């Protein structure tokens, strides 16, 4: 019997190189990581331009259109600007922590995407140009992900929680009270919104019965069930809202609001150090959008109803390219929706921001998790959308009965105020016509303007 075509090639390779399924999956993972990290980095650069274009369109402006045809080279110009700007370190700053803080927020964002399933299962026997026979991998299949981890959702939560260290250290190491307060605000915000995000993720895990991202996508394929967006709309809304808050996107960008705290935790940063903070925000957006697509939009699935034709889960290179195109398209749409939210909704006050998490989203997520667990225990998993409606009704009826924090912005009586007038020395409300008038300019016929 003649030797396989791949025998002559393999004899020149090291002994530890063998066409085993594990080794093929390792090589595939390295290739996926190298390809997707460059795709996401370029996508982040052009996501900035997309946001500027979308905001210009929503505000009836033109947007960037000077650098290159239709402004397509604007991201390159922005990158050169950051590289050429002067690096500045404040006096008294902790230089080591001040330098590594941007990396501590960027690296977790870059690590999280590793377990995203960008495509299904590739049959290496369908590789073109006879590569399968040449390499001896005719019967091997690989998954298109950086790392195939059966507890991928736990990995996601663990890695995502590390970003808070970069924010806290960046604010503290700057030796600036504005940066320190911004870092504390951002840290409190990120920690608070990780709780409802984890609970919303647990709702999907209970419905799918697995922590494996590939199995979660398979649970939303025809014959298994519809997209989780249709089955778990409340969990999807909670997860998306937390995703915006985790990446400090509006309307949750209080830590960076110029009107609030100068520039937040990165007030003292410039040049490429600031660019790394800026890049981390968009990397968080892209990675979070990819996970949202996996959890709630069926991954590479095109059929949201769980019945009918759809892309196969396993096939050749053309199928994998189609699946990756669907995933990238869904990710882009979710990112664009987040940009539309930024230029549509006003910012919350910080007390409103924290109240939304602790008095609104966390109780709702706990209720949704309880309902999901009850439905799955009773065997009603295919009707979990009724549980979502029940959660909405319960939140609407029981929400007003829950204890709430006192309003920290109630009106305080002030001498001379038209809205809460107080008579000096008595503490009683004044009945002076000028004090009680809402007119911008008091009428002279009401008497003297001063009530002191």
Image: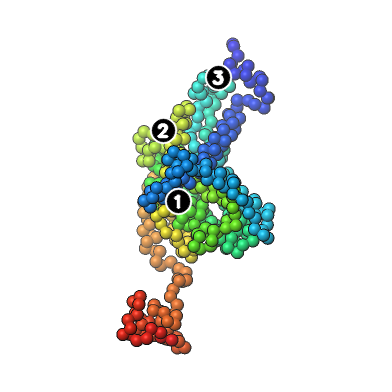
| In this view, the mark in front (1 or 3) | 1
Q: Which residue: 43% across, 66% down? A: 402
From the top left corner, tell me how far across and down residue 54 is, in percent. 41, 48
Label placed on residue 133: 3
- Judge the density around disc 1: few (<14), some (14-19), many (≥20) Cα neighbours within 10 Å: some
Cα separation between marks 1 and 2: 26 Å
* Label 2: element kind: loop
Q: Is residue 116 above or below residue 252?
A: above
Q: Secondary structure at mark 1?
A: helix
Q: Is residue 186 above or below residue 300?
A: below
Q: What is the spatial separation of the Cα atoms under label 2 and label 3, in whole angstroms? A: 27 Å
The residue under label 2 is 311
Q: Are marks 1 and 3 in contact (CB under 8 Å)?
A: no
Q: Is residue 44 above or below residue 28?
A: below
Sequence-first tag of 1 and 2: 1
Q: Nearer the viewer, residue 86 or 109?
A: 86
Q: What residue sits 60% from the left and 14% below the top?
A: 3
Q: Is residue 375 visible?
A: no
Is there a contact, CB below 8 Å, between mark 1 and mark 2? Answer: no
> Which dot marks residue 240?
1
Task: Assign a secondary structure to mark 3.
Answer: helix
Q: Quadrant of the C terminus?
A: bottom left
Q: Assess disc 3: are there few (<14), some (14-19) or many (≥20) residues with their C-alpha within 10 Å of its C-alpha.
A: some
State which mark lies toward you, 1 or 2: 1
Q: Foreground: 150 or 298?
A: 298
């Amino acid at each position: 019997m003649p030797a396989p075509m791949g025998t002559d090639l393999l004899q020149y390779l090291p002994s530890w190189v063998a066409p085993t399924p594990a080794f093929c999956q390792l090589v595939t993972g390295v290739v996926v990581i190298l390809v997707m990290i460059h795709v996401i980095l370029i996508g982040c650069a052009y996501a900035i331009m997309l946001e500027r274009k979308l905001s210009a369109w929503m505000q009836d402006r033109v947007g960037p259109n000077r650098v290159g045809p239709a402004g397509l080279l604007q991201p390159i110009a922005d990158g050169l600007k950051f590289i050429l700007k002067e690096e500045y370190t404040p006096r008294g700053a902790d230089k080591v922590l001040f330098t590594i803080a941007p990396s501590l927020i960027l690296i977790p964002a870059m690590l999280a995407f590793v377990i995203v399933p960008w495509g299904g299962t590739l049959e290496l026997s369908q590789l073109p140009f006879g590569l399968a026979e040449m390499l001896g991998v005719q019967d091997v299949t690989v998954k298109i992900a950086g790392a195939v981890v059966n507890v991928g959702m736990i990995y996601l939560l663990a890695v995502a929680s590390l970003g808070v260290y970069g924010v806290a250290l960046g604010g503290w190491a700057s030796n600036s009270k504005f940066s320190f307060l911004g870092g504390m605000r951002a840290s409190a915000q990120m920690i608070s919104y990780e709780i409802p995000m984890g609970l919303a993720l647990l709702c999907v895990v209970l419905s799918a019965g697995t922590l494996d991202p590939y199995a979660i996508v398979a649970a939303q394929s025809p014959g298994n069930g519809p997209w989780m967006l249709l089955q778990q709309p409340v969990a999807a809304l909670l997860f998306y809202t937390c995703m915006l808050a985790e990446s400090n996107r509006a309307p949750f960008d209080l830590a960076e609001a110029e009107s609030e705290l100068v520039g937040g935790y990165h007030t003292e940063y410039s040049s490429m150090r600031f660019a790394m903070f800026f890049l981390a925000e968009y990397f968080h957006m892209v990675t979070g959008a990819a996970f949202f697509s996996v959890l709630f939009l069926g991954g590479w699935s095109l059929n949201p109803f769980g019945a009918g034709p759809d892309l196969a889960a396993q096939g050749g290179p053309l199928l994998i390219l189609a699946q990756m195109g669907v995933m990238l398209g869904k990710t882009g749409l979710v990112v664009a929706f987040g940009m539309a939210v930024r230029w549509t909704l006003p910012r919350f006050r910080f007390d409103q921001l924290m109240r939304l998490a602790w008095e609104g989203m966390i109780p709702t997520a706990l209720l949704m998790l309880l309902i999901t667990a009850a439905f799955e225990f009773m065997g009603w998993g295919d009707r979990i959308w009724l549980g979502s409606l029940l959660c909405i009704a319960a939140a609407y009826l029981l929400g007003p009965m829950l204890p709430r924090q006192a309003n920290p912005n109630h009106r305080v009586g002030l001498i001379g105020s038209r809205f809460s007038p107080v008579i000096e020395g008595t503490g009683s409300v004044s009945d002076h016509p000028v004090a009680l008038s809402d007119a911008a300019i008091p009428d002279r016929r009401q008497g003297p303007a001063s009530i002191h």
